Image (cartoon, helix red, strand yellow):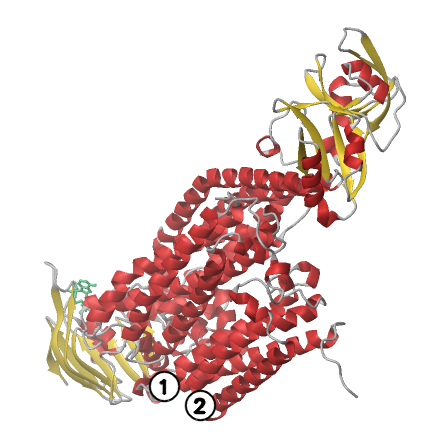
């Protein structure tokens, strides 16, 4: 294991987050089994009060996981100097088979925690807490993901040894050759990637508009959000990053976060993440609107989430467009 | 949206006034918090700055170093190896270097003796680092003498003292001419300490190294990248060890924060009870307390970081320098180049604000869920 | 306006010191009237007021506010109803120390997120009406008992509640101050508010503004007129 401050901090954060959620599982189970609002007993009252604690803890976990995600990528990039052949975060993550799974699990935890908080937010608007069982069952399901994320990250960091020869991003993400899954993403033709991106953004914006205007089809918006996220990430790897680096064969989702490129990656990722998490949330809120006690509040929540989601995707699209526009690299000849 | 904003503003106002009303307690907490941030930040700032210093120094060192090994130990390398190396494809140049260590009984210190490649030192004169000048109390124009390998005295007149800008490595330098070096240690004219190699294409360093290795089997080849990496991980490791030692302190701080947060005074409990009775919701109270915590955290974080910055970059990191620099007889007096790194700030945040938040959340929740009807009795 | 049917309240339920403070209360409170609860100490008056005022939930039984059953609402929604419908004046006034009178008056409105300037204006207006204008900037702990009570009344009125609940409002006041309080009650009644009070003081129960008197003993209503 590499004994490094950022690594210790990351392990601390994931460990504590997992522990917190794990510690809430017995309580969640009690809620699933015993919750009864009609009961005026003190036990029920205590249970109700305990839900405030769990919600607060989950908020902290989500904030911590978000910060940890940024720290993780940042640190991976920084550690690249420790590994021969690694030039950026991709190299560091490839040092060990657990590297990319750690990243993916961190993303999953972030999105799931976000969904849970939306569920909680909506549920708290219904006078009879109609989703409380769903919510706490979801919490029970969330726990293994968090624990898994902490364990996988532990395995990754434990396995790190400085000076392991790895393939770095310039070979890994350059099209063709090595059989890595991300590779097929990188070799996605630019035209196809951009058309897919434009199509999915148009679709997600349209479905968002439907939610905004008619307060329905939240589920469709959520689905399209997931699609837009995946396509957006692929487009960043295959094409947009190339425009930023102005090098046709440099495909890397992390280097755009670096100072050399003006931290421009944040302007892409933050709106994309906001758009996705709010899009998923809008779907959840729309679904919750079927409960009688939420029939007025949930659509409102869905609407404001959809507004955020639409704003996020629109901003993402604009930033991507601007990056392509300002780039000196020309991938498409305009035929007069 | 304006409702939301108004509410946050009103709560923040109230949080500030409520912190002000308990100034003693707030300050007590803030001081401890600030100190813990300052200590951790000092460790990080210092080790980071020193790493950068080392990297800067190494940036000036050769990409490739060839040493001769005899029975697994470093030995003087014959000059004819130079030609063999120059013959390797991709090598731009190869030069022999002369350097070593000299123990000075008068100062009980070790100097690094070198024949500089980039400046000419006349025979009989020497250029010394600031540390050397300090321990021996010499200045330009003074004489220094040492016993050579054969017992004869060799005298040097100090021609120049290297000033402080990269003092970490130059402090113990003692630059002499080639003739004096050979006379002092009895090194034959056709031997060098090691050979530095410059490579035409930096990307081929590894290939060139392999070729030299094949051509000269009795040598060891050191790559700059490898030194750099080793430095990195050594300093990382030291920093990590220090931080782990400080985990005790963080834990103590978390317990302290927990205690402060749960040891609400009767007055504070009464206040929360009143707030709940007059129509504040549990989550409003939690938010209020969270804001108080945020204000204290941010204040302490900034103050602590500033303190650490001053400590490391203006007061010479008096507290931990010995541990992080390693042990050497001669500590160079030096000023580190100030540098603030985002990753480091983020890491520090995890070491301080995160534990604080976690330690206070349960006590806050407990206080916020008092019965609203409690004030009626 | 407020209906209670079979309301019971237990403390320390399921433990050795379990205690039923209310043992089945049926009650109707009419809108715009002044109702006084009286009875010996420990008879459950305060406990009953907390049920009516959404400060606590009954262990069993129903509480209906304007036809809406609020007895099994979670605390979050009870609070919501409480802060828009009820204003409270507590026995020992319970002002927050270290902040001024006018800030005390504003506190209940903070979580509602109204405009700050308008809120401050309203608070001053209320204090003026209660002849506390000159003391608006005084620290709460310097106020005399009568002044503190008027600040507490202003605080109860800041969110313009329909119902004002006062627990032993005259216990800490001399008779002149008590009479002044009853005048304020009369004024609030003229504004169309419903007022619920508990009191040991016969002066209060017999006052002209009082419409109904409910007498309690050992957690049950023994007389209502
Ligand atoms: N939190 C509690 N835990 C246990 N017992 C309680 C609690 N609150 C009230 N009680 C009990 O319930 C009974 C009724 O209390 P309550 O305060 O309603 O009486 P009250 O009629 O208002 O009396 P007083 O006139 O003295 O104010 C009392 O015997 C009291 O001891
Ligand atoms: Mg009482």
For the N terminus of chain C, give its image quadrant: bottom left
Q: Give the quadrant of residue B138.
A: top right
Q: What element carries label 1?
A: loop
Q: In this view, does B25 lie to the left or right of A147?
A: right
Please name the residue shown 46% across and 93% down the image: A214
Which chain contains the residue that carries disc 1? A
Whether residue B168 is visible, yes or no, is: no
Q: Residue furthest top?
A: B151
Q: According to the image, label 1 marks what residue?
A: A289
Looking at the picture, does residue C94 appear above or below residue B360?
Answer: below
Please name the residue shown 49% across and 91% down the image: A210
Q: Do the residues labelled 1 and 2 touch (CB within 8 Å)?
A: yes
Of residues A190 and C74, which is closer to you in this image? A190
Q: Which residue lies furthest to the bottom in this view?
A: A214
Disc 1 to disc 2, C-alpha distance: 10 Å
Q: Give the quadrant of residue A134.
A: bottom left
For the C terminus of chain C, give its image quadrant: bottom left
Question: On the same chain: label 1 and label 2?
Answer: yes
> Residue A18's spot in the image, x, y percent?
37, 57
Whether residue C68 is visible, yes or no, is: yes
Taking the image in four quarters, ligand 1 sits in the one at bottom left
Q: Is mark 2 on a helix, strand or loop?
A: loop
Which chain contains the residue that carries disc 2? A
Count of labels shown?
2
**Label 1: few (<14), some (14–19) or many (≥20) C-alpha neighbours in 10 Å:** many
Q: Give the quadrant of residue B153.
A: top right
Of residues B161 and C74, which is closer to you in this image? B161
**Label 2: few (<14), some (14–19) or many (≥20) C-alpha neighbours in 10 Å:** many
Q: In this view, does A199 lie to the left or right of B124?
A: left
> Residue B27's spot in the image, x, y percent?
50, 48
Q: According to the image, label 2 marks what residue?
A: A215
> Residue A246's spot in the image, x, y percent?
72, 68
């Amino acid at each position: 294991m590499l004994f490094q401050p950022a690594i210790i901090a990351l392990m601390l954060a994931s460990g504590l987050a997992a522990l917190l959620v794990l510690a809430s599982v017995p309580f969640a189970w009690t809620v699933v089994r015993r919750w009864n609002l009609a009961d005026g007993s003190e036990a029920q009252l205590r249970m109700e009060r305990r839900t405030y604690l769990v919600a607060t803890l989950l908020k902290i976990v989500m904030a911590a996981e978000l910060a940890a995600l940024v720290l993780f990528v940042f640190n991976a990039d920084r550690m690249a100097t420790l590994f021969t052949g690694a030039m950026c975060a991709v190299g560091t993550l490839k040092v060990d088979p657990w590297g990319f799974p750690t990243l993916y699990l961190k993303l999953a935890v972030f999105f799931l925690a976000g969904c849970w908080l939306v569920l909680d937010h909506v549920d708290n608007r219904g006078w009879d807490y109609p989703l409380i069982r769903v919510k706490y069952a979801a919490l029970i399901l969330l726990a293994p993901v968090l624990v898994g994320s902490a364990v996988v990250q532990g395995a990754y960091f434990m396995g790190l040894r400085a000076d392991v020869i790895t393939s770095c991003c310039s070979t890994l993400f350059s099209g063709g050759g090595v059989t890595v899954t991300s590779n097929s993403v990188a070799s996605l033709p630019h035209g196809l990637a951009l058309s897919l991106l434009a199509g999915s953004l148009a679709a997600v914006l349209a479905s968002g508009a439907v939610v905004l205007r008619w307060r329905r089809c939240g589920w469709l918006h959520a689905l399209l959000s997931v699609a837009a996220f995946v396509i957006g990430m692929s487009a960043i790897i295959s094409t947009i990053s190339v425009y930023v680096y102005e090098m046709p064969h440099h495909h890397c989702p992390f280097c755009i976060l670096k100072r050399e490129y003006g931290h421009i990656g944040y302007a892409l990722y933050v709106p994309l993440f906001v758009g996705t998490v709010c899009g998923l949330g809008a779907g959840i809120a729309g679904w919750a609107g079927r409960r009688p006690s939420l029939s007025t509040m949930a659509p409102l929540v869905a609407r404001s989430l959809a507004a955020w989601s639409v704003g996020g995707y629109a901003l993402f699209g604009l930033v991507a467009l601007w990056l392509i526009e300002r780039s000196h690299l020309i991938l498409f000849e305009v035929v007069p | 949206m304006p409702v939301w904003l108004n509410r946050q503003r009103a709560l923040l106002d109230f949080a500030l006034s409520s912190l002000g009303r308990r100034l003693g307690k707030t300050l007590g907490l803030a001081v401890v918090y600030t100190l813990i941030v300052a200590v951790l930040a000092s460790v990080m700032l210092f080790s980071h700055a020193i790493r950068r210093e080392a990297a800067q120094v190494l940036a000036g060192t050769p990409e490739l170093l060839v040493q001769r090994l005899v029975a697994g130990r470093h030995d003087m390398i014959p000059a004819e190896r130079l030609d063999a190396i120059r013959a390797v494809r991709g090598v731009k140049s190869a030069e022999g270097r002369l350097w070593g260590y000299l123990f000075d009984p008068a100062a009980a210190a070790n100097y690094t003796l070198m024949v500089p490649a980039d400046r000419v030192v006349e025979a009989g004169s020497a250029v010394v680092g600031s540390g050397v000048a300090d321990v021996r109390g010499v200045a330009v124009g003074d004489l220094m003498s040492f016993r050579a390998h054969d017992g004869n005295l060799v005298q040097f007149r100090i021609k120049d003292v290297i000033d402080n800008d990269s003092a970490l490595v130059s402090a113990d330098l003692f630059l002499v001419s080639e003739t004096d070096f050979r006379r002092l240690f009895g090194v034959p004219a056709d031997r060098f300490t090691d050979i530095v190699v410059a490579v035409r294409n930096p990307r081929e360093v590894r290939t060139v190294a392999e070729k030299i290795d094949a051509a000269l089997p009795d040598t060891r080849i050191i790559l700059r990248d490898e030194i750099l990496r080793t430095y990195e991980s050594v300093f990382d490791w030291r920093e990590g060890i220090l931080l782990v030692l400080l985990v005790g302190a963080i834990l103590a701080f978390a317990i302290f924060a927990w205690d402060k947060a749960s040891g609400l005074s009767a007055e504070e409990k009464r206040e929360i009870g009143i707030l709940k009775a007059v129509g504040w919701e549990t989550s409003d109270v939690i938010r209020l307390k969270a804001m108080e915590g945020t204000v204290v955290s941010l204040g302490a974080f900034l103050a602590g970081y500033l303190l650490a910055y001053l400590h490391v970059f203006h007061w010479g990191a008096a507290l931990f320098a010995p541990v992080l620099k390693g042990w050497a007889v001669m500590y160079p007096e030096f000023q580190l180049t100030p540098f603030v790194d985002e990753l480091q700030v983020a890491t520090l945040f995890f070491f301080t604000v995160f534990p604080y938040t976690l330690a206070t959340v349960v006590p806050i929740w407990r206080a916020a869920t008092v019965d609203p009807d409690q004030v009626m009795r | 306006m407020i209906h209670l049917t079979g309301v019971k309240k237990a403390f320390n339920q399921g433990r050795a010191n379990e205690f039923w403070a209310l043992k089945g209360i049926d009650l109707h409170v009419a809108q715009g009237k002044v109702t006084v609860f009286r009875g010996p100490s420990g008879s459950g008056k305060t406990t009953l007021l907390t049920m009516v005022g959404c400060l606590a939930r009954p262990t069993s039984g129903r509480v209906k506010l304007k036809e809406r059953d609020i007895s099994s609402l979670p605390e979050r929604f009870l609070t919501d109803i409480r802060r828009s419908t009820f204003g409270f004046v507590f026995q020992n006034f319970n002002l927050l120390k270290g902040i001024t009178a006018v800030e005390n008056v504003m506190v209940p409105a903070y979580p509602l997120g109204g405009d700050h300037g308008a809120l401050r204006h309203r608070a001053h207006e209320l204090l003026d009406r209660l002849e506390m204008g000159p003391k608006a900037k005084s620290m709460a702990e310097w106020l005399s008992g009568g002044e503190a009570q008027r600040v507490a009344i202003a605080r109860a009125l800041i969110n313009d509640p329909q119902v004002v609940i006062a627990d032993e409002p005259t216990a800490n006041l001399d008779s002149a101050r008590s009479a002044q309080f009853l005048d304020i009650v009369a004024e609030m009644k003229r504004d169309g508010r419903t007022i619920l009070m508990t009191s040991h003081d016969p002066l209060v129960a017999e006052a002209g503004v009082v419409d109904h008197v409910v007498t309690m003993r050992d957690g049950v209503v023994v007389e209502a007129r």
